Image (cartoon, rainbow, N blue to C red):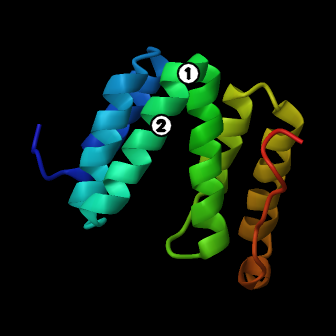
Amino acid sequence: MDPSFVRAHQYLVIFYEHEGMFEEAITEEGRVYGLRGVAPETIAKFEAGLKEAYRTQGGRGYWQKRLEFAMEVERSKIEYQSPIYIAVIYGQLGANDRAFEWLERLTRHVLHPSSRSKSIHASSPCD
């Protein structure tokens, strides 16, 4: 694997998450962020938050923290946050209605590109 090929590392994160290998997923996601030029202190904060959530609350804590971080990115508009990614996290948390809301939002944006200027925001995790 080309160590600088970000997409391959992203797929590895997905694999680790699917297999319940959350520590490995956290480390690999840190590599992804590093390859994308994210500041080391931001990566360290991300990794520490996920590790603590996983250590204290298990897989559910991991997904809750992922959702929290994803929503921070979504609200900040620093970078694009895929509605599919947020839907997947809600699905992992068992919040299927919320997952479908995000998929519907994506559909509206794809079918009505002029609505892309409107922000896609979610309420607090698992409402």
- Measured from the top left, where is residue 64 in percent x and y? 65, 36
In the image, 71 versus 112, the foreground residue is 71
Mark 2 or mark 1, which is nearer to you?
1
The alpha-carbon separation of the residues under discs 2 and 1 comes to 10 Å
Kindly tell me whether residue 64 is visible in this rendering: yes
Secondary structure under the numbered disc 1 in the rendered image: helix
Quadrant of res 121 = bottom right
Image point (57%, 64%), residue name: 73
Location of residue 56 with respect to 12 vertically, above or below:
above
- Measured from the top left, where is residue 108 in percent x and y? 82, 65
Image point (72%, 28%), residue name: 93
- Measured from the top left, where is residue 117 in percent x and y? 73, 85
- Measured from the top left, where is residue 61 in percent x and y? 61, 28
Q: Is residue 115 left or right of residue 8?
A: right
Quadrant of res 77 = bottom right
Location of residue 12 with respect to 79 vertically, above or below:
above
Q: Is residue 29 left or right of residue 80?
A: left
Image point (13%, 52%), residue name: 4
Residue 50 marker: 2
Residue neighbourhood size for the residue with mark 2, other residues' Cα within 10 Å, grouped as few (<14), some (14–19), many (≥20): many
* Three-letter residue code for mark 1: Thr
Q: Which residue is mark 1?
A: 56
Tell me the quarter of the image containing the N terminus: top left
Mark 2 vs mark 1: which is more N-terminal?
Answer: 2
Image point (74%, 59%), residue name: 106
* Three-letter residue code for mark 2: Leu
Q: Is residue 27 left or right of residue 67?
A: left
